[in-house]
Amino acid sequence: MHPVLFLENHYIPAHVAYTLLVVVLLALLSFLATRRLETYPGRLQNVMETIITTLNELLQNTMGHHARRFFPLIATLGIFILTSNLLGIIPGFESPTANINTTASMAVVVFVSTHVVGVMTHGWKYVKQFLGPVWWLTPLMMPIEIISHLSRPLSLTVRLFGNIMGEDIVLAVVLLLVPLLVPLPVFALMIFTSLIQTLVFMLLAMMYIAGALEEGH
């Protein structure tokens, strides 16, 4: 990634600049959609309400009565990831999620949130989840559980980064080698992949947090 000029004699990485662009864009859309809430919504309000309703139903189906509690975190991640993924489809722009630093930061947020929620819910009994079903299996189960949990942020990071980076590379190659109208199927595939990768990240985050809420047995 090439650095992008931000202020006079100051440079910031491209993925940070595009992340800020996504944040500003989403904040602006949220403001415009909610500044005048109406009983009969306009187009923008209707679109935003549809997105929020869809995300809420997804959380309700996955996390049950815990959905409302974690809606701000999961919905924010989902909307940010999807917007970032789709940004790379526009020629001349790059997806912030095509940089491993962006995906790693979100994976760390999910990882820390999972264990903070576990400790807040169960206290130090949360450690029982790492000890195995019976005490004499603890020396075997504890290393396995620790490695399993540490692999989660790595999996979230690499999966999203690899897929979106691959999309951006394919799109760049196709635009260089073929006429303008030929890449249209590639655009459609990229939109589909962007949706799938967003859904996968959200579902895994919800499953990890839901697992931390369960009692250790």
Image: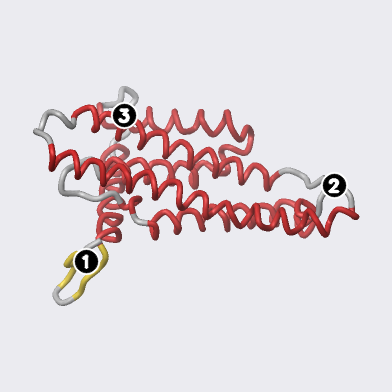
Q: Residue furthest left?
A: 179
Where residue 80 sits: x, y (%)? 37, 46
Task: For the residues labelled 2 and 3, say whether their Cβ atoms are less than 8 Å apart.
Answer: no
Q: Amino acid at mark 2?
A: Pro
Where residue 197 sits: x, y (%)? 42, 39
Q: Residue furthest top?
A: 40
Q: Which residue is mark 3?
A: 47
Where residue 108 sits: x, y (%)? 51, 58
Q: Residue furthest bottom?
A: 9
Q: Is residue 157 above or below residue 67?
A: below
**Of residues 37 and 121, the one drawn nearer to the viewer in this rendering:** 121
Q: Quadrant of the C terminus?
A: top right
Answer with left or right where residue 135 lies relative to residue 81. Answer: right
| Residue 61: numbered disc | none
Which residue is depicted at the point 42% across and 46% down?
160
Which residue is depicted at the point 34% across and 56% down?
99
Q: Which residue is mark 1?
A: 3
Alpha carbon distance from label 1 to label 3: 34 Å
Q: Which residue is mark 2?
A: 133
Q: Quadrant of the N terminus?
A: bottom left
Element at label 1 = strand
Q: Please report whichever mark, 2 or 1, sits nearer to the chain's N-terminal start.
A: 1
Element at label 3 = helix
Element at label 2 = loop
